[in-house]
Image (spheres, rainbow, N blue to C red):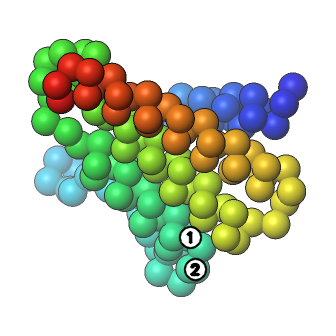
Amino acid sequence: MSVRTQFIMLALGLSMATPVLAQEPHAPATHGHADTMAAAATDPVAKAFEDANLKMHKDMAIAYSGDADVDFVRSMIPHHQGAIDMARIQLMHGKDPGMRALAEEVIKAQEAEIAEMRKWLQDRGM
C-alpha cells in the first residue's frame, strides 16, 4: 500500500472517529481546536498548522446556493487549498523523506484539482 493511500485511509478514519464534544448551549463553537490553539501559542509549527486550518474553515464557510454541484466545488476549493498550505508547512519543517514526498504529491494533486474546479465554475459563468 502506498504512503499516499495509507495517509488517505488514516485521514478518513480519524475524521470518522472524531468524538463530538459536549458544549454548553451558550458556549462558542471551537470545532475541537482548544488543545491545538493552546499548542499554537507556544509552538511555531503548531501555530502554522492552526492558522492554515482556521483559514481553511473560514474560507469553506460559503453562502450556499442550493445547487449541490456548485456548493461542493465552492467548498472543496478552499478545502484543497488548506491541504496545500499544510503540505507546504510540512515541507518547511518536516524531516521524514516519506512525508516530504507525500506533501509534494498532495500539492501537485490538489493544485490540479483546484484548477479543474475553477475551470468548471468558469465554464458555468461563475
* Res 7 label: none
For the point 60% across and 60% down, the residue is 88
The C terminus lies in which quarter of the figure?
top left
Q: Nearer the viewer, residue 16 or 63?
A: 63
Question: Is 21 rendered above or below residue 51?
Answer: above
Amino acid type at image mark 2: Asp
Residue 35: image location, x then y, percent: 49, 64
Residue 4: image location, x then y, percent: 75, 35
For the point 27% across and 26% down, the residue is 121
For the point 69% across and 28% down, the residue is 9
Q: Which residue in the structure is indicated by mark 2?
A: 43
Task: Say whether marks 2 and 1 touch (CB < 8 Å).
Answer: yes
Residue 15: image location, x then y, percent: 53, 34
For the point 47% across and 81% down, the residue is 41
Kind of element beneath mark 2? loop
* Res 46 label: 1
Residue 17: image location, x then y, percent: 56, 32
